[in-house]
Image (cartoon, grey):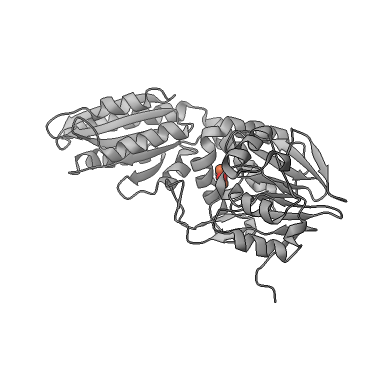
Amino acid sequence: MKKYSVPEISEGVYWVGVKDWNRTMFDALIPLPQGTTYNAYLVKGKEKTVLIDTVNPGFEKELGEKIGQVIDLADLDYIVMNHAEPDHAGTIPYIIKVSKEASLITTEKGAKMAKIYYNVPEKRIKTVKDGDIIELGGKTLKFIEAPWLHWPETMFTYLVDNKILFSCDFFGSHTAFGLYDEDVEELIPLAKRYFGEIMMPFKNMGKKALEKVKELEIEIIAPSHGPVHKNPERILEAYRTWTAGETREKVIIVYVSMWNSTQAMIKTMVETLLSEGIEVSLYNLPTADIGDIARDLVDSRAIVLGTPTVLAGMHPLAIYASYLVKALRPPLKYGAVLSSYGWGGGAPRQALEILGPTKIEVVGTLEINGPPSADDHQKVIEIGKQLSNKIKEMGNAADRTVKRF
Ligand code: FEO
């Protein structure tokens, strides 16, 4: 029996990636409740063999041994670097050292990064452009530039004969479970969370990439994180919706409360929105998982931010959440801010400063001193109704056609 499972996902195409069950954070920012995978694929033609992407540093030996179950690693001809980020390219120095003849194939921008990050000698790098191909003997690889998915140098690789699109980060999900899409029960919510965290800021580039691959016959999408898509249409359709910024009649509420005054206003807001038929996703920031928030930002039409004033500004958790909303560039259209202060206000002013440069239209702001009075609750109800009306005005007919992903 061989040491590792190296499944042949299609004729002559082997999964040689690794599962990182124990990783809990990505970029020191994103929680990984299910760990993640670094997928790498070995494609064996009649004459040449190519490794598509590598894995995170620390897994060199495992990657090398998995490749070694299929070919002698020293005989590898090419390494395709679809993306230079270390989770996929970090073991290139090891592969380059062991496979003495292998050339690194990447875009022009990728070539610069390969030299800076991984000290790959210039003579070992082969630069490719959109539409370039290489022949492996009975198999052809075609390269498709797909910049900003997720760095400027990124590209996809298409294996013409097997109809496989190797898309690196695009179409990925952070989970160490399963090999194929059918193995992961909650795949679309996981993929949506990943999209919100990684791809949402680049959704226009994602839309362009989807246009580019539209004409390709795709039987398998093989990303570099998470399961391989044997049913590519499911994830393609989800990505069409997400990259188009299609929103639902849905509000995401993120709040923090110190003495329950802000929370009491948020509760009234939730009840108002629900009674207006609006979907609500509610997050109490001290315990919220920001990956879940990113997932719900993908298709929310409005946001309500609740924060007390702390030392003349927002609570630090609310500052963090607002900054994240600004950075992730979700398709939010409307917003509202609810705030309570003890002895001096200022939180809403700061919220508007942070969210001001976004395209979010702030429909209402309420700042109160201490716990909300009956009159204050009424004001929250009015803001909630205004928000609901704005949300519903926005093309309900179109919304009915939006599939829920
Ligand atoms: Fe999975 Fe952008 O690296």
Which x, y percent locates residue 283? Answer: 35, 45
Point 38% across, 36% down: residue: 276
- Residue situated in front as seen by the camera: 372 or 326: 326
Residue that appears at 87% across and 50% down: 137
Q: Can you tell me which quadrant of the image ligand 1 is in?
A: top right
In the picture, the quarter occupied by the N terminus is: bottom right
Q: Is residue 340 above or below residue 60?
A: above
Which residue is the extreme one toward the left?
343
Left or right: where 147 falls relative to 309 = right
Quarter of the figure with residue 278: top left
- Image coordinates for residue 367, horizontal then vertical, percent: 22, 29
Q: Quadrant of the C terminus?
A: top right
Visible in this render: residue 40?
no
Q: Measuring from the top left, give residue 185's x and y in whole percent.
A: 56, 59
> Outermost residue toward the bottom?
1
Q: Is 330 left, or right, of 42 in this rendering?
A: left
Q: Nearer the viewer, residue 225 or 77?
A: 77
Foreground pick, 135 / 36:
135
Total tally of numbered discs in the picture: 0
Residue visible at 50% across and 57% down in the picture: 35
- The image shows residue 145 at horizontal and vertical percentages of 69, 34
248 relative to 363 in the view: left or right: right
Residue appearing at x 21%, y 27% in the figure: 346
Residue 112 visible in this rendered orientation of the protein: yes
Q: Is residue 31 above or below residue 326?
A: below
